[in-house]
Image: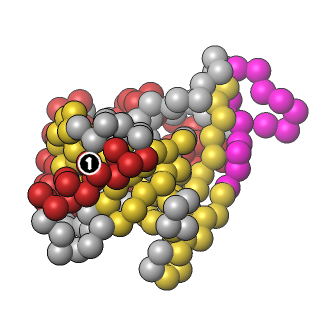
Amino acid sequence: MKSNLAEHFSKVRRRKDITLAQLARMMGYRNISKGCRRIDRFEKFGDICEELLVKLAVALTIDQQTVARLLDEDRQRYFREWDQWAATPIRPSIVFGHIGGIGWSELLPKDITREEAEQYASAVAKEKNRPICLVLSRRLSILFDADGNRTSVSETKPGEINLPYIRFGRRKVMLDLEAGTMQPLNDPQKPGPVQVVTDFGGTRLRSSFQITESKPGELTINIDGPFFEFDDDAPQPEGE
C-alpha cells in the first residue's frame, strides 16, 4: 500500500538535497550502509520501526503534528482498502485444522447457500469427530464442535484473517496441504511503524522475503537473509 508518510519523508529529504548516506550520518549511524538500507526501505515500502521514525523526523525537522496527520491518512486509506478486500467474494471452505499456519481445508461449491454450507459443515465435523471452521467470506466464519454443534460465529476486523496463514515479512500466504496449494492472501498492508519482534537486547535477527505470483496458485519466494542487526552502541562482530 502506498504510504503518504513515507512519500512525504522522501520528498522532504530530496527537497533538502540530502543523500541517504548524509541522512544516515545525521541520525548517528556508524554503519552508514545499514542506515541507508533502512531509510531506503522505508521510502520504498513504508516499512519502519518506531525508533527509526522518531530519528528520521528529528533529522529532517518534521514536526509531530505532520507525522500524526500522515499516519492518520494512511490508516484511513488502509481501512477503506481493507473493507473493499474483505467484501470481495471468495469460495466458501471448511478448515479442518492447521499447524503453524499450514492448514487442511476443503473448498465448497461456489453456489452453495449459507444454510447448505452450515448443514454440510456440521455433518463433516460429526463424521470426523473433530472441531472445524466454516469460512463463508473474508469477514464471516462459523465454528463447529466435534459433535457438529455450532459454537460461535465470528466476524473479522481490519488486520484480522480468518484462515490459517504464514507471514513472510508483511505478506501473508495460505498453505493448504489437503488441496496442495499456496495462495497469497493479498490483504492490504497495515501502515505505520512496526515493532521488531526478534530482539536480543540490541541485536536483532531479520530476514526479508519477496513473493511473486508466477501464475495463479503458484508462488515464487525469494529469501534474503537471515541477517543479524546490531544497535550502533552495541558490540559488533568483526566486519560489521
Identify whether 65 is placed above or below 185. Answer: above
> Where is mark 1, residue-wise?
122
Q: In terms of secondary structure, where does tag 1 sit? A: helix
Q: Which residues are magenta?
A: 224-240
Image vertical order of residue 148 relative to residue 46, above or below: above
Expressed as whole percent of the image width and height from the top left, the position of residue 192 reads 32, 41
The one of 109 and 37 positioned closer to us in this rendering = 109
| Left-right relation of 197 to 131 | right
Which residue type carries mark 1?
A: Ser
Residue 63 in the image: state x and y as whole percent: 24, 33
Q: Quadrant of residue 80?
A: bottom left
Crowding near the residue tagged with mark 1, few <14, some 14–19, many ≥20 C-alpha atoms within 10 Å: many
Above/below status of 160 relative to 86: above
> In this orientation, which residue lies closer to the viewer: 171 or 88?
88
Residue depicted at x 45% and y 80%: 216
Residue at screen point 59% across, 29% down: 198
Q: Position of residue 193 (x, y in %)?
A: 37, 37
- Regarding residue 1, the answer to whether it shows in the image is no
Answer yes or no: is residue 179 visible. yes
Query: Going 51% across and 31% down the picture, which residue do you hit?
Result: 196
